[in-house]
Image (spheres, coloured by chain):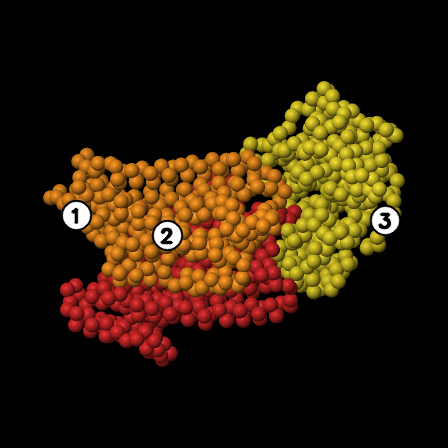
Chain colours: A yellow, B red, C orange
């Protein structure tokens, strides 16, 4: 499980999986005044594939994940035409109890900061037990321990029994994130949602953690946000590029990263440091919440803008590759 | 104190913390070693604090201004009489000599005698202590129950109607002096509704105290099987207990709202929810996370209550330690005042010391030396 | 200091409260303005308003219920309760405010000194811990009583009780500000300690300190009332709300409710006003912090 994964991506196969989660026109509003943070985001996740969601801080990617998990609480609001998890129904219309049963068991979650996730005062074992008990998956503390310790061991936690019986505060960042991954693995959820799982970790540990959670697994679907494009290139099959609460480009990684169609995607790719090339940077900053216009949100920063950009561009298929879609009036075209 | 400490503007800045030196970035060592060094540091501070308290209680009397002796002797008393009073109080001797005999007496368990009736200070305090305990312990429990209950409610429904209601209620209640609360309770519950007995003490006018075992009337009545007396004692407790409970509950409510509110907004709780934990477990997680500031605040209040029920005791003629202290102050009985200050401060210090040990046990973050949250 | 359980704000919480914050600030501001209005009105009434009766006069009309002649009724010696309640603000409010001011000065100076480098700040805080474990109210009552009920001792009493809270607040704020980047930058750029204090520390803790000041004023008023309720400090016949409640309370059982209700109501209103001001100021500082 811990062999380093540096092999190139498997070739993109169109009909590889069954749909697992189908989200259509997801909208999230913040506060009583309803500032919109997510605009009509649609995506379809297929079983066994790994999806990356990229974009600058504040572009709404974490919010999308939280909406799927049902963690957006009043007074904030979530709306969607549908948010269908196969075999479970529309997540938006589930009863709280049913949704609770899904969380953790069917949908695993890996938080950005493992220290912000694990309870600082309770022991790791106590948290494991409470988690398993909440899903009726354990008979006793002893039972929980017998399941948790081997799991930690498999995830490369040295001295797993001691870690299990100790406090999370005593762990290093990498170890703590392994514990969180253990939580997201032990009940074998079909969907694992990871919110910047490596941002808070040391560079040396990042790769180990990604190898643990992002290895391809035909039974598990991964939806991960990051602002590290190289992580997406290595560990994801498909990518969504988000800007100001919208998906501006989506498609297979090898197509989107090779032939970016949206000027924003191209700019993001251009700002990845590469040896021997000057580092490009994008002038300006994204609009803040509630600052939206009727047009393309990227237009003020875009070199290619024209009058038509005063209208919101729809997300349309583009280029020669199926599933590669972009929301731009002036797609870059290129090799595709 | 009967006027409670001002509710902290910020949990961090306002409440006095009995312990400190945690944010010193001590590198992680083994748990046991840390516990030991923590314990030792606390233990080393304790005698120093006790000495400070001793010094203050000593100076309180030793530095009595001339005018006080005149007042004690009576307005217009002759200089000879004033000198006599000073000699009786022992404050005509050199300071060091006074301190020597004060400490010497303390070491033999002698806190001096009342200036007026020559009763032993310690004996009087021991006599009065049960009444105060009988009042303060249930009052404190009521405050915890009401305060943590309403504070949790407000924190859980943060920025929504229950929160606004609780905050409005606490702000209003906080603005009513304790003695007004007591008078209002007496007016409505005793004179308008007639549900409870008049504030004339611990028992009815012709009530006979049960045989003295613990000094707590309720307990002693049960031990003696005097159920009528038990009922009488309980009824006389209701109003003062409620007064103390409500006025303290306001502070607990605020502290709970602040610390639980932070915890519930925090990422630990969001993660707990993402694991599918039921809401009562989520609340439990939040409570455990925020219990250290709560515990700190509770210990402070508990310690202060030992001497802080003075005004309520006076209003209800409860004849407890607080009322005795207050009477000693207003009748200008310096040895009594000195004993009272020494006792209550010592109890408080010991309570703080115990609190530190308990917090260190309960919250592993403390032993790791940094306030990571 | 207490163990900080600093909230790690989630991205939802961090991005969200733009709208919600606007709302709380408004609610807080309403309280702030209302509180200030109450205090200013009371102060103006106490000094400028021509009282209908001499508050110190007695008359044969004792224990009269409120009427058009005596809005708040009369007390046991025939004094006009309305005049006495308003006049009492002249005694109680300045006492409370003087004590608060003293606590503020002691607290800010002490807190800033204790926030300096070296072991002495920590040691000072330990002394403060021991100090606050004393039964301060009883000690201050003793001080006031033994000094022969000098009124300035009441102010000193308030400062002794409330000062330590200021010290803690100012110190913890100064410590966390000293660690912030802009102060570090300023120190690195060679700013003198005094300049750092004047330019960075004090302005940045202003609203929290002001909020604590209002809170202290509320508490100080309760202390003044409690002292005069038990007959220490302000002496009868000088009108003071606490002593008026004390004498009135004895007659509550015979139906003379107004003797208690009006002075008690005055205490309530004033303390509430200060509490509202404190809450309003705290909300403002919280809003500012979220924005920065």
Q: Is residue B188 left or right of residue C6?
A: left
Identified at 22% across, 46% down, the residue is C259
Q: Circle 3 sits on which residue?
A: A6
**Chain to which mark 3 belongs:** A
Which circle, 3 or 1, is nearer the viewer?
3
Name the residue at 76% across, 51% down: A203
- Label 2 chain ID: C
Q: Quadrant of the C terminus of chain A?
A: top right
Instruction: Give the label on residue B85, or none.
Output: none
Q: Residue at x 67, y 54 (%)?
A: A132
Q: Which image quarter: residue A122?
A: bottom right
Which one is earlier in the sequence, the residue at label 2 or at label 1?
1
In the visual, does B359 lie left or right of A70? left
How far apart are labels 2 and 1 at the CA level? Answer: 36 Å
Classify mark 2: helix, strand or loop: helix
Cα separation between marks 3 and 2: 69 Å
Q: Is residue B151 visible?
A: no
- Choose between A49 and B367: the one closer to the eye: B367
Residue C102: give its label.
Answer: 2
Mark nearer the viewer, 2 or 1: 2
**Chain ID for label 1?**
C
Q: Secondary structure at mark 3?
A: loop
Q: How many marks?
A: 3
Residue C33 in view in this figure: yes
Q: Is residue A308 above or below residue C102?
A: above
Can you identify the residue that label 1 sits on?
C76
Residue B360: x and y in percent read 55, 64
User: Are the residues flagged by discs 3 and 1 in contact, CB closer than 8 Å?
Assistant: no
Q: Secondary structure at mark 1?
A: loop
Crowding at mark 3 (Cα within 10 Å: few <14, some 14-19, many 20+): few
| Residue B272 locus on image (x, y percent) | 63, 50
């Amino acid at each position: 499980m811990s062999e380093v994964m540096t092999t190139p991506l498997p070739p993109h196969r169109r009909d590889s999986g069954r749909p697992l989660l189908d989200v259509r026109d997801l909208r999230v509003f913040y506060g009583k005044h309803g500032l919109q943070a997510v605009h009509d985001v649609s995506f379809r996740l297929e079983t066994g594939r790994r999806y990356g969601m990229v974009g600058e801080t504040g572009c709404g990617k974490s919010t999308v994940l939280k909406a799927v998990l049902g963690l957006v609480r009043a007074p904030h609001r979530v709306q969607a035409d549908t948010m269908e998890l196969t075999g479970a129904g529309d997540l938006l219309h589930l009863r709280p109890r049913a949704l609770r049963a899904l969380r953790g068991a069917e949908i695993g979650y890996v938080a950005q900061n493992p220290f912000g996730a694990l309870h600082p005062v309770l022991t790791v074992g106590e948290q494991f037990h409470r988690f398993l008990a909440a899903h009726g998956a354990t008979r006793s503390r002893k039972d929980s321990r017998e399941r948790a310790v081997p799991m930690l061991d498999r995830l490369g936690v040295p001295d797993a029994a001691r870690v299990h019986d100790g406090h999370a505060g005593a762990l290093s960042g990498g170890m703590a994130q392994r514990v969180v991954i253990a939580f997201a693995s032990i009940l074998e959820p079909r969907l694992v949602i990871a919110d910047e799982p490596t941002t808070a970790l040391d560079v040396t540990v990042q790769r180990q953690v990604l190898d643990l959670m992002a290895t391809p697994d035909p039974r598990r679907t991964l939806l991960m946000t990051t602002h590290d494009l190289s992580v997406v290139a290595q560990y994801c099959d498909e990518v969504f590029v988000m800007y100001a609460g919208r998906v501006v480009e989506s498609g297979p990684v090898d197509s989107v990263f090779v032939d970016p169609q949206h000027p924003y995607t191209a700019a993001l790719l251009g700002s990845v440091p590469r040896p021997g090339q000057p580092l490009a940077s994008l002038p300006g900053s994204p609009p803040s919440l509630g600052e939206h216009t009727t047009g393309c949100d990227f237009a003020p920063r875009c070199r290619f803008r024209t009058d038509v950009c005063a209208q919101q561009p729809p997300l349309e298929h583009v280029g020669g590759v199926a599933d590669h879609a972009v929301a731009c009036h002036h797609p870059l075209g290129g090799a595709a | 104190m009967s006027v409670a400490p001002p509710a902290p503007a910020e949990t961090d800045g306002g409440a006095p913390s009995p312990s400190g030196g945690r944010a010193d970035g001590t590198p992680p060592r083994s748990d046991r070693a840390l516990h030991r060094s923590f314990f030792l540091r606390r233990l080393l501070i304790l005698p120093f604090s006790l000495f400070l308290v001793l010094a203050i209680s000593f100076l309180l009397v030793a530095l009595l201004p001339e005018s006080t002796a005149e007042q004690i002797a009576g307005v217009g008393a002759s200089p000879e009489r004033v000198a006599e009073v000073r000699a009786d109080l022992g404050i005509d001797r050199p300071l060091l000599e006074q301190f020597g005999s004060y400490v010497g007496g303390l070491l033999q368990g002698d806190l001096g005698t009342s200036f007026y009736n020559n009763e032993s200070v310690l004996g009087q305090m021991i006599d009065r202590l049960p009444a105060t305990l009988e009042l303060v312990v249930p009052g404190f429990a009521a405050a915890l129950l009401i305060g943590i209950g309403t504070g949790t409610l407000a924190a859980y429904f943060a920025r929504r109607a229950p929160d606004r209601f609780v905050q409005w209620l606490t702000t209003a209640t906080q603005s009513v002096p304790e003695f007004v609360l007591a008078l209002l309770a007496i007016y409505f519950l005793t004179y308008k509704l007639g549900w409870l007995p008049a504030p004339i003490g611990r028992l009815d006018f012709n009530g006979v105290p049960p045989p003295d075992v613990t000094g707590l009337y309720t307990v002693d009545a049960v031990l003696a099987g005097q159920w009528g007396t038990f009922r009488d004692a309980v009824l006389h407790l209701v109003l003062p207990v409620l007064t103390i409970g409500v006025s303290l509950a306001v502070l607990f409510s605020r502290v709970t709202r602040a610390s639980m509110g932070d915890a519930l907004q925090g990422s630990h709780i969001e993660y707990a929810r993402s694991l599918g934990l039921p809401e009562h477990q989520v609340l439990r997680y939040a409570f455990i996370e925020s219990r250290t500031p709560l515990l700190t605040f509770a210990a402070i209040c508990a310690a202060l209550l030992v001497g802080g029920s003075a005004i309520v005791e006076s209003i209800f003629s409860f004849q407890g330690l607080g009322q005795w202290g207050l009477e000693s102050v207003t009748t200008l009985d310096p040895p009594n005042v000195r004993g009272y200050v020494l006792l209550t401060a010592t109890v408080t210090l010991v309570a703080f010391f115990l609190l530190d040990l308990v917090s260190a046990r309960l919250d592993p973050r403390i032993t790791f030396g940094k306030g990571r949250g | 200091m207490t163990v900080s359980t600093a909230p790690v704000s989630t991205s939802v919480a961090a991005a969200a409260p733009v709208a919600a914050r606007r709302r709380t600030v408004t609610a807080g501001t309403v309280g702030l303005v209302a509180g200030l209005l109450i205090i200013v009105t009371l102060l103006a009434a106490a000094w400028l308003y021509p009282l209908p009766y001499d508050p110190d006069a007695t008359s044969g009309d004792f224990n009269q219920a409120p009427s058009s002649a005596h809005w708040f009724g009369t007390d046991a010696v025939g004094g006009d309760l309305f005049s006495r309640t308003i006049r009492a603000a002249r005694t109680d409010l300045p006492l409370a405010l003087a004590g608060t001011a003293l606590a503020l000065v002691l607290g800010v100076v002490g807190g800033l000194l204790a926030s300096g480098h070296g072991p002495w700040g920590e040691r000072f805080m330990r002394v403060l811990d021991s100090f606050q474990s004393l039964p301060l109210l009883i000690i201050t009552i003793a001080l006031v009583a033994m000094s022969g009920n000098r009124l300035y001792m009441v102010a000193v009493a308030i400062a002794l009780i409330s000062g330590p809270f200021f010290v803690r607040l100012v110190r913890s704020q100064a410590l966390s500000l000293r660690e912030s980047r802009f102060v570090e930058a300023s120190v690195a750029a060679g700013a003198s300690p005094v300049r750092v204090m004047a330019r960075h520390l004090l302005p940045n803790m202003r609203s929290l300190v002001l909020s604590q000041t209002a809170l202290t004023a509320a508490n100080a008023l309760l202390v003044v009332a409690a002292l005069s309720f038990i007959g220490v400090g302000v002496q009868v016949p000088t009108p003071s709300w606490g002593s008026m409640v004390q004498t009135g309370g004895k007659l509550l059982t015979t139906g003379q409710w107004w003797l208690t209700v009006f002075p008690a109501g005055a205490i309530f209103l004033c303390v509430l006003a200060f509490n509202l001001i404190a809450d309003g100021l705290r909300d403002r500082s919280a809003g500012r912090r979220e924005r920065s």
